[in-house]
Image (spheres, rainbow, N blue to C red):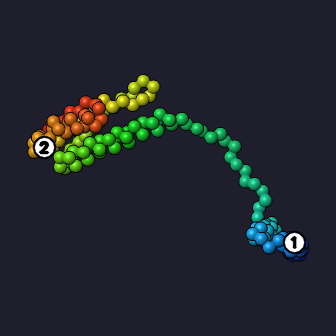
Amino acid sequence: MIRQLFSQLAALAAVCTVTLMICPETEMKKYVRFACVLCAVSVVVSFLPFSKDLPVLDKSAADVADMTDKAAEMIVKETVSRLEEAVTELAYRRHGIDKDDITAVISYRRGDGGITELDGVNVTLKGLKYAVYTVSLKNEVKELFDIPCEVVISE
């Protein structure tokens, strides 16, 4: 086996040497060298004790589930969650309302053709100190989303 490896490497070395001698001194010579090295590596690897049998794969059928509706619902919920955060951020930046003192809930429904439509925004502010901002916040949110908005004060 070792004798066979050396004889194949010797034959490959002879072929590569002749090829490199014939090859002109250009950029192409480095690619020819690279090909010779790859051939030598493949000869050496072919003598390593690997199993030549391919693994037998399980022949059971794969179950494929259609999760399009579930993925769409997850996207809608994440989008609504981010819109609610945007309302909270708007109230904080424009009116200084603490993020812990505001709760924004956006209601939505699935319309015709699977299109999600926003129904309205319900904003709850905790504390009477924010009562002066209810009308302006209601108008800003209504203008931002073009849907009805209700702002309520809770204590």
In the picture, residue 118 is in which quadrant? Answer: top left
Residue 45 visible from this viewpoint: no
Badge 1 amino acid: Ile
The x and y percentages for residue 154 are 14, 39
> Residue at 20% of width from left, 33% of height from top?
150
> Residue at 73% of width from left, 50% of height from top?
56
Quarter containing the C terminus: top left
In this picture, residue 87 sits left or right of residue 7? left
Total numbered badges shown on the rendered structure = 2
CA gap, disc 2 and disc 1: 88 Å
Q: Which residue is mark 1?
A: 22
In the picture, residue 104 is in which quadrant? Answer: top left
Secondary element at tag 1 = helix
In this picture, residue 49 sits left or right of residue 98? right
The x and y percentages for residue 111 are 39, 26
Badge 2 amino acid: Tyr
Residue 130: mark in rendering: 2
